[in-house]
């Protein structure tokens, strides 16, 4: 899988073996497709939206009130920097929300 700028990001996934040193005890869940701004995007069951977006090459999830780029900061549900819109509902934290098959995620990537 390539990022929006064409760089392969798939080796960021936990459990993907590149050189035999990857975590052998971690297995990826079932491959699923969710949508980022309408674009079909690969993910695996059990991943957070944050992880799936990072592996798909997205770093900016939204903009601040002063138009500054925002993405993941704490990665554990504290800072609210990773807010995304899911299925046209209220914004939720990408770092603590699991991605689901067919989920529609809206980000403001720039
Ligand atoms: S990155 Fe801090 S709440 Fe998600």
Image (spheres, rainbow, N blue to C red):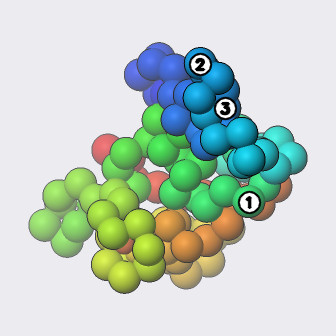
Q: Residues within 10 Å of mark 3 (few under 14, many from 20)?
A: some
Name which residue lies at 23% across and 54% down.
Answer: 69
| Numbered label attached to residue 46 | 1
Is residue 39 among what the camera can see?
no
Q: Mark 3 sits on what residue? A: 16
Q: Is residue 79 above or below residue 42?
A: below
- Determine the CA span between mark 2 and mark 3: 9 Å
Q: Mark 3 or 1 closer to N-term?
A: 3
Q: Quadrant of the C terminus?
A: top left
Q: Mark 2 sits on what residue? A: 19
Q: Secondary structure at mark 3?
A: loop
Label 2 CB, ligand 1: below 8 Å? Answer: no
- Determine the CA span between mark 1 and mark 2: 23 Å
Name which residue lies at 82% across and 42% down.
Answer: 31
- Determine the CA span between mark 3 and mark 1: 15 Å
Query: Which dot, 2 or 3, sits closer to the camera?
Result: 2
For the image shown, how many numbered marks are present on the structure?
3
Q: Secondary structure at mark 1?
A: loop
Rendered location of residue 98, percent (x, y)? 67, 66
Name which residue lies at 18% across and 60% down.
Answer: 67
Q: Quadrant of the N terminus?
A: top right
Q: Secondary structure at mark 2?
A: loop
């Amino acid at each position: 899988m390539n990022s929006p700028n064409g760089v392969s990001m798939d080796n960021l996934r936990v459990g993907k073996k590149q050189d035999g040193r990857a975590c052998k005890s971690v297995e990826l869940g079932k491959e699923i497709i969710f949508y980022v701004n309408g674009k079909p995007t690969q993910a695996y069951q059990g991943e957070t939206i944050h992880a799936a977006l990072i592996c798909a090459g997205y770093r900016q999830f939204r903009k601040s009130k002063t138009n500054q780029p925002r993405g993941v900061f704490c990665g554990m549900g504290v800072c609210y920097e990773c807010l995304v819109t899911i299925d046209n509902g209220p914004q939720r934290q990408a770092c603590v929300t699991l991605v689901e098959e067919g989920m529609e995620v809206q980000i403001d990537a720039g």
